[in-house]
Amino acid sequence: MTEEKATEMRPLWVFGYASLMWNPGFKVAETALATLYGYHRSFCMSSIHHRGTVKDPGLVLALDPKDGAQCTGLALRVAEREEQATIAYLRDRELVSSAYVERLVPLALQDGRNVTALAYVIDTRHEQYLADLDLETQAGIIATAVGGRGPNTEYLWNTTRQLETLGIKDDELSWLSDRVSILAGRHQ
């Protein structure tokens, strides 16, 4: 995607499927439940900055391409006149290691509208991409990792809680949340 395309979008929508749902960090004018087809939410990205370190990597969620998959999250409409500042902020936040790729994606909003949104998807060729980690391995990593934005557990629990609040069912994240609570010695 060219930089021009994203900065010219009016209105600008952003797809939140993990921390952007509970901590967008920019002025949001509207939110709507939305589904992205062809991707699933997955702890497939090694986190060496935000939720882990180079020595002790954590895991963060990414949009992982998969035929027949779908991911439900939040479409976040950026406040008017905040588009360029929001894009700059998101690039600084999400593209810190180039493991994410910025894409314009089609979203189906729950209210029947269709919009194009800015999303950050995993680069499946990047060294931080970890395909097909089993849930127990994921839980073990998440239970102990800590990075510049805090414990990996906090990221998981905040995301799971937000999904539950929104009525979005994600069996893998629910299982991980329960398992990590046990491994971390915390029972929610």
Image (tube, rainbow, N blue to C red):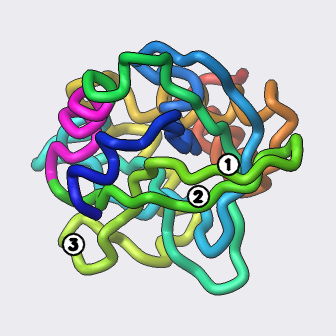
Kindly state the secondary structure of the residue where label 2 is placed. Answer: strand
The amino acid at mark 1 is Leu
The amino acid at mark 2 is Arg
Which residue position is annotated with label 2? 41
Which residue position is annotated with label 3? 126
Which residue position is annotated with label 1? 173
Q: Earlier in the sequence, mark 1 or mark 3?
A: 3
Tell whether label 1 touches label 2 (CB within 8 Å).
Answer: yes
Magenta stretch: includes residue 12: no
Q: Is residue 137 above or below residue 29?
A: below
Give the image quarter of residue 126: bottom left
Q: Which residues are magenta?
A: 87-97
Q: Earlier in the sequence, mark 2 or mark 3?
A: 2
Magenta stretch: includes residue 94: yes
Residue at the spot 29% in from the left edge and 64% down from the top edge: 1
Alpha carbon distance from label 2 to label 3: 17 Å
Q: Position of residue 3 (x, y in %)?
A: 21, 51
